[in-house]
Amino acid sequence: MSAIDGLPPLREVIAAHDLRAKKQLGQNFLLDLNLTARIARAAGDLTACDVLEIGPGPGGLTRGLLAEGARHVLAIEKDARAIPALNEIAAHYPGRLTVIHGDALMVDPLAHLTPPIRVAANLPYNIGTELVVGWLTPPQWPPFWQSLTLMFQREVAQRIVARPGSKDYGRLALLAQWRCEARIVLTLPPQAFVPAPKVESAVVQLTALPAPRYPADAQVLSRITFAAFNQRRKMLRASLRGLHPQIETLLAEAGILPTARAEEIGLDRFCALARALKSQPAG
Ligand code: SAM
């Protein structure tokens, strides 16, 4: 039986190309094309956009993105076994899908993309955090993309959208929310994937803000949040002591109690502290 887009069902594609999932490549495939279409729709209006997809595998999400009208999709896949299957999709959508066989951490996608660009992916869990941190920091910032629609293990998704006071709140939340609107748009049970992972998954939508939410020097902010969350149980006057001899004065200037702990402090206060530290560099 053919699927809604006239291509073979994904189970047949996987059997025909002997695409048994490999754990070391973080392969958990989505085979339900209704679900991949839902994820594609969560990425927004794709009709006037190029879409970067990392790790297309057998192409379930790729087909969703194309069926939802993406102008052009650039798909970067490390597993050579998936390339013929992806080329079949490219032939079905002439001129709209470019497939690159390579490592997403090494390939520069920009040569193959025309703005506006959105990123959509069911990320391999082993490089998901590294990729998203890369997309949120220089030299990849300011962003080449308008939005990121990314499937992660639910625990990572929660760390991206976490608010102060929660156990998931930390550097990833601050980094993401400083420059983006971040929200979870879909949560999926393990059974949605083949093979089923041990944990739930969630799709996070990150939309780049025109400017960071609060002014701050990115490197100073990064140093502060690293020191603060590296010893998250400590009071800030202790965990940040190494940053400045008068750290308590700077904390007061930023409106932060010296006895507070990192997880209680919002992005606005961390940015205020970064400004205070920048204006009074240590020694
Ligand atoms: N998008 C497909 C889907 O939703 O069914 C597959 C998702 S699977 C979680 C992750 C995919 O990323 C696999 O196809 C895997 O081979 C690929 N992958 C793993 N490491 C990669 C890397 N460094 N660069 C590009 N692709 C990678």
Image (spheres, helix red, strand yellow):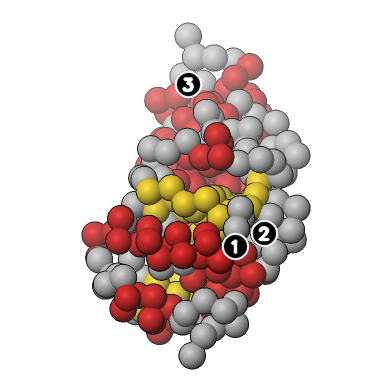
Residue 163 lies, in percent from the top left, at 59, 58
For badge 1, the amino acid type reads Tyr
The residue depicted at 52 percent of the width and 61 percent of the height is 91
**Residue 35, can we see it?**
no
Residue 26: image quadrant is bottom left
- Label 3 CA crowd tier, 10 Å (few <14, some 14–19, many 20+): some
- Label 2 CA crowd tier, 10 Å (few <14, some 14–19, many 20+): many
* Tag nearer the camera, 3 or 1: 1
For badge 3, the amino acid type reads His
Q: Secondary structure at mark 3?
A: loop
Residue 4 lies, in percent from the top left, at 60, 82
* For residue 13, above or below residue 151: below
Of the two numbered discs 3 and 1 on the same chain, state the one appearing first in sequence: 1
Q: As drawn, which residue projects farthest toward the top?
A: 283
Q: Is residue 132 left or right of residue 182?
A: left
Residue occupied by mark 1: 93
Mark 1 vs ligand 1: CB under 8 Å? no
Residue occupied by mark 3: 244
Residue occupied by mark 2: 70
Q: CA distance from mark 3 to mark 2?
A: 50 Å
